[in-house]
Amino acid sequence: MAKKDYYEILGISKDASEAEIKKAYRKAAMKYHPDKFTNANEDEKKNAEAKFKELNDAYQVLSDSQKRAQYDRFGHAAFEQGGAGGAGGFGGFGGFGDFEDLGDIFSSFFGGSGSGFGDQRGRRRTVQPGADLRYSVEITLEEASKGVEKHIKYEKNGKCHTCSGTGAEPGSGMQTCSKCNGQGRVKQTQRTMLGNFETVVECDQCHGKGEVPKKKCSNCGGTGIEKEVVEKTVKIPAGIDDGQRLRLSGMGEASPSGGPNGDLYIYIKVKQHSIFERIDDDLVCEIPISYAHATLGGDLEIPTIEGKIKMKIPAGTQNGKVFRLKEKGMPNTRGYGRGDQLVKIVIEIPTNLNDSQKELLKSFDKSLKDKNYNMKKTFFDKIKNLFV
Ligand code: ZN
């Protein structure tokens, strides 16, 4: 039978906060606590025990951010060996995350010996995935626009090539771990203000595998791990934005307990561009033009991320006017077409005029009438009305 979803067991959503998880757990744990069923019939007891165990398994994983992340990624497989299913999981008896807070309902339960049902449970092993790795790649806006392939090189803990990660000298085989008797976990006594609690932790001799090599691998000394340099070409999709990341599944470190590899996260940094600023999928740039050019209108050469194009600006283009060039922005990574390019016109006032230029400008200015200045005229009309 498939294992129930941990979020479902606690009746919470996938994005529940830590507080919500704890609250849901407390509420459900009170309901199915074995102490409440001491006078119940066998069926009811069994049912409550199963429910209680399910709750604890779910809580142990979801209350621990690291385990929760693994669970979100791999589901139950994150904590099982070879898909054995059923009894697997982190649900070690007594391994609650938060004794003091939950002490009020659990103190009696933990205090008595053998009142629980932890001992009846079968062999439990944990399989942890290897660690995730992070790699940063810097690209230009042009590269982000077209998509690009980048060569990456990094060192990681890989599987030992001599023993294929088993830790055993080839041909020597495995034997039951003496420290945990093959359980993969060992009991640990924890002192708290509510008394001593037994918790179950991963066996550090076999890393939860329950078995150790008869003869340790001569290459890796029995760890099953050796340093490995990975070189790879990574495809960075068109449209990727600064701060986004790519996940390369299984490209992280090898697991010390025979679990799946971790993942490699490629973090993308897009270098600042000299003229473009990206806003969502649009590209914004400012283009300085002369006063005469703006007044007379005409052709204007515009840089786009894919090269220069020409556009016409109308006569009388005002300072700050924004033109929208359809689909000249960045491609959308999810395939929703392209953004636009927004071109903001900045009229540059000339400086350092010589005398003859000044004279020309003065006589030109004198020639202008009210009708040449729409904004100015309206403004002075308003002022006249203000001070009558
Ligand atoms: Zn080895």
Image (cartoon, rainbow, N blue to C red):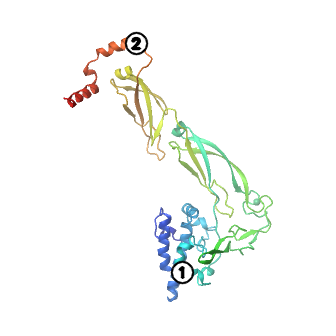
Q: Is the residue marked 1 within 8 Å of ligand 1, measured from its CB?
A: no
Q: Residue at x 77, y 64 (%)?
A: 168
The answer to whether any part of residue 77 appears in the image is yes
Looking at the rendered structure, the secondary structure element under dot 1 is helix
* Residue 72 place in picture, x, y as percent: 54, 62
Q: Is residue 31 above or below residue 369?
A: below
Q: Residue at x 49, y 45 (%)?
A: 333
Q: Quadrant of residue 129?
A: bottom right
Q: In terms of depth relative to the viewer, which is nearer, 107 or 253? A: 107
Give the number of the disc on residue 235.
none
Q: Quadrant of the C terminus?
A: top left
Using residue 261 as the reference point, say whether residue 25 is left or right of it. left
* Residue 61 place in picture, x, y as percent: 56, 67
**Distance (Cα) linking label 2 and label 1:** 96 Å
Q: Quadrant of residue 367?
A: top left
Q: Is residue 217 above or below residue 314?
A: below
> Which residue is label 2 attached to?
357
Please say if the residues under marks 2 and 1 sit with CB atoms less than 8 Å apart. no
Q: In terms of depth relative to the viewer, which is nearer, 86 or 184? A: 184
Looking at the rendered structure, the secondary structure element under dot 2 is helix
Q: Residue at x 37, y 23 (%)?
A: 294
The mark total stands at: 2
User: In the rendered structure, which amino acid carries the disc numbered 1?
Assistant: Glu
Q: Quadrant of the N terminus?
A: bottom right
Q: In terms of depth relative to the viewer, which is nearer, 161 or 42? A: 42
Using residue 202 as the reference point, say whether residue 45 is left or right of it. left
* Residue 217 place in picture, x, y as percent: 79, 62
| Quadrant hosting ligand 1 | bottom right
User: In the rendered structure, which amino acid carries the disc numbered 2?
Assistant: Gln
Give the number of the disc on residue 49.
1
Q: Residue at x 50, y 69 (%)?
A: 22
Q: Quadrant of residue 345?
A: top left
